[in-house]
Amino acid sequence: MSMRSLLRPAAGFTCLFALATAGCSAGSGGTTDAAPGPSKRTSASPSRQAAGDTSYAPYVSATEASANDSSGSPSTYNLAFVISDGSDCTPKWNGEDAIADTAVKSRISKLTADGGTVRVSFGGASGKELATTCDSVSKLTAAYATALDAAGSSQADFDIEGDELTDADTVALRSQAIAALQKERPDLEVSFTLPVMPSGLDSDSLALLESANKYDVQVSTVNIMTMNYGESYAGDMGDYALTSAKAAHTQLRKVFGLSAAGAWQGMALTSMIGVNDVAGETFTLSDAAQVRTFAEEKGVAWVSMWSTFRDQQCAKGGGSDAATDCSGVKQSSGAFGKAFAG
């Protein structure tokens, strides 16, 4: 399961996106149904919202506009992705574009013109997440702050997957930096986007959440990526999304000491629309409607998709491989956004 750092079309595809909560290794690394032992209740518990108040917050490119960005009238746009430039602690959009790029600022202004907000997403499946190149808590905190200030955002999403998810040192460093950042910015809302399986979050994702608890990170939402489960999962993708959510819900209750309602309200769901990176996995418009209905019934915080660039039919109908610029299924442009918005 994964979301790519780059939304631009590519020649081949092995793995695509980020959710409070993806990695291609999720299907092969093994998962566990069991949450860690009861941890002390901390203020890191996901925040609560009114039941049924599920918002729509798609992942969009921070640098390139899509004609489908505004489909479904999103309340928030997840800007993908801020990562390191590859050599030091300098944050850049997709590791390439300057964080204060005027074109990006102009794009953000257009996205928020109708009252929506932007959430800066750090990480993704490609490139180097900042915690792997910043060598101190203070430098990492400053790098995150620089990106948030450039976007004018008080919402931070950390899409942690692949090697970054299994590296205990960078997990701890990131947790400390986020906690320090929240002390400076008490209004900062933090989400973690993590890979999931129908059996729930794996041990590495649970360890990351325990690390957030340990360092008193105030977690607003855990966004699970309901996608790319592995070739042994050849069933209905909508059903898998709901099964994954239910399993993760049980785990979040234990990790954060939440009520049943509180755990739903601290969860978000992100699906990869259309043809996924795993052969045989296709997420349809009816699946999107199924996820939306479920999220509303449970009071899930927000639903999302990877990505607005893909929310259109491929020029030649698509194929067996996932593309970055179309869904691979028959649809009208923006149809997935409307389905997720309800």
Image (cartoon, helix red, strand yellow):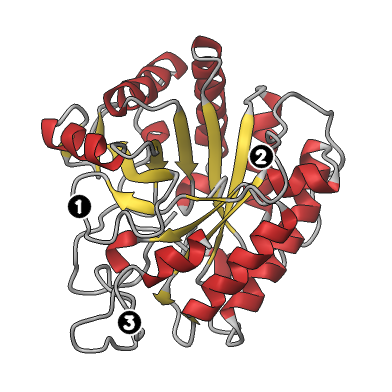
Residue drawn at (52%, 69%) of the image: 227
Looking at the image, which residue sits at the far front?
114
Label 3: few (<14), some (14–19) or many (≥20) C-alpha neighbours in 10 Å? many
Label 1: few (<14), some (14–19) or many (≥20) C-alpha neighbours in 10 Å? some
Looking at the image, which residue sits at the far left?
102
**Residue wearing tag 2:** 209
Q: Of marks 2 and 3, which one's residue comes earlier in the chain?
A: 2
Task: Give the residue type at disc 1.
Answer: Ala
User: Left or right of 78: which side holds 99?
Assistant: left
Q: Of marks 3 and 1, which one's residue comes earlier in the chain?
A: 1
Cα separation, mark 3 vs mark 1, equals 20 Å
Which label sits on residue 328?
A: 3
Task: Give the residue type at disc 2.
Answer: Leu
Q: Position of residue 142 (x, y in %)?
A: 36, 17
Residue 7 vertical position relative to residue 252 in the rendered view, above or below: below
Q: Position of residue 268 (x, y in %)?
A: 59, 51
User: Left or right of 315: which side holds 51?
Assistant: right
Q: Of marks 1 and 2, which one's residue comes earlier in the chain?
A: 1
Q: Position of residue 138 (x, y in %)?
A: 42, 14
Residue 269 visible, this angle: yes
Determine which quarter of the picture holds residue 43. top right
Label 2: few (<14), some (14–19) or many (≥20) C-alpha neighbours in 10 Å? many
Q: Secondary structure at mark 1?
A: loop
